[in-house]
Amino acid sequence: MPTESPSGFYNIRAFGAKGDRSANDATAIQAAIDACAGAGGGTVRFPAGDYLSGAIVLRSHVTLELMAGATLWASTDPHDYPDARGKHLISAEDAEHIALVGQGCLHGQGEADLPWAQAKNLPFRIGVLLFEHCRHVTIRDVTILFSDAWTVHLRRCQTVFIDGVTIFNNVQHINSDGIDPNSCRDVHISNCHIVAGDDCIVLKSTGSEPCENIVITNCTVETTCAALKLGTESHGDFRNIHFANCTIRNSFVGIGFYLKDGASMEQVTFSGISIECNPVRGNQAFPIFMDIEKRHEDSRIGAIRDVAFRDVYIKSGSGILIQGMPESLIENLTLSNITLRAEHADDYTNRRKPAGGTRTVKDERDTLYAQEPAWCTIAYVDGLTVRDLHVHVSEEAAGQSPRETLSLHHVANASVDDEPAQ
């Protein structure tokens, strides 16, 4: 078996991979990765073929290249994932200068519909990729299909570039998130197309470390959950986060801020965003949703400040809902050049704010402002600027449910179209 490659390229077939999807090629793939890392780094190549594999571990200075016609299939046998840290096809920990690239495909085999009631009782589910405490990470051009759980989970990583990646999961397969940067910094996500059975691009902080310096551009996303999201896990702060030139379609929540665990979310911008929002699972849609709450009675209260939405175009029968708490007002919020077009009006009678994960505390804000007859409802904000908010309502929608354009509650220091608001 070869141990080194003068050219820096390591073909997994030379290490015994069959590529016929009948045998588990994990041992051969891992041998190629280890040989590449042992030689100081290089590229591990997957030529055209169908490679079945259990868990493999990526090492520092190693690039996995899936060539055109190559598909890496995740084994569905629990015995192929012996590491108790998690069930993932590809993982890396404390690695640097690692990459996954190429015109090939990764297949998670999570194709079946999977409702929440069934998913929460499953002991074994596979995520495609987990990188923890890694630096200088690149994921480029690959296609990922039908992840069974979170597709790309980045935990406490730094300097990450994700570009040109396609993720296509079953939209009825719950928890099949697209990309989850979790307490990461210096992350760049661009030119991606994501269809997911849960949140598409969602920033989290499951620990105290911040999620910061994040740029997401030129992506198209679709989900029955939230398309672009901060939270719900929000123990560490979120700051310096920018979304631009993204298209959201056929989603329950277009843009969501779910602050539950006491962190702050600040210096966040959205610009050039197109949103098509539709009701799912009997709930009403929320093209933009912002909320501060306590997850549990003993949870800290968080803060949202310095957030701007500019040049946002919405098509929805439901309106925007933004609400802070009486104990924590959203500070310095700007909505500029927001256009909402409604061809019909969704029924607000039973409209509730999105739950967004586990929660044991409830209050009147669960429904009070969600059911307000308005296309844009804002509550508990200090420092509000609204400029060029345009709502175009069809005759049918106007007849279904008369609504105000803008409804403000407990808002201080507000300016609407350059005029002070009362």
Image (cartoon, rainbow, N blue to C red):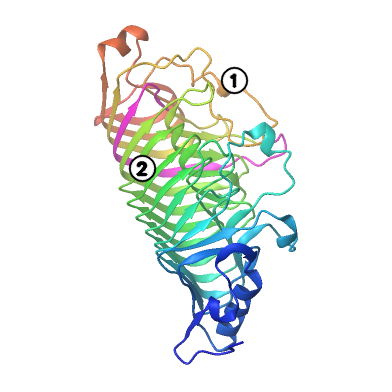
Q: Position of residue 163 (x, y in %)?
A: 38, 61
User: What amino acid is found at the position of numbered circle 1 in the picture?
Assistant: Glu
Q: Is residue 240 left or right of residue 53?
A: left
**In the orientation shown, which residue stands out farthest toward the bottom?**
6
- Identify residue for label 2: 308
> Residue 232, located in which quarter of the rendered image?
top right
Q: Position of residue 238 (x, y in %)?
A: 51, 51
Q: Is residue 263 magenta?
A: no
- Identify residue for label 1: 364
Q: Is residue 300 magenta?
A: yes
Residue 225 vs 57, above or below: the answer is above
Q: Residue at x 53, y 42 (%)?
A: 303
> Residue 407, located in which quarter of the rendered image?
top left
From the viewer's side, name the closer residue of 17 and 233: 17
Give neighbour class at mark 2: few <14, some 14-19, many 20+ (Cα, 10 Å).
Answer: some
Residue 282 vs 133, above or below: the answer is above
Q: Residue at x 60, y 48 (%)?
A: 149
Q: In 3D space, how far apart are the residues under numbered discs 1 and 2 (Cα atoms)?
A: 26 Å
Magenta stretch: helix, strand or loop mostly? strand
Instruction: Provide the residue span drawn in magenta.
Output: 296-320
Q: Position of residue 126 (x, y in %)?
A: 64, 53
Q: Is residue 36 left or right of residue 413?
A: right
Secondary structure of residue under mark 1? helix
Secondary structure of residue under mark 2? strand
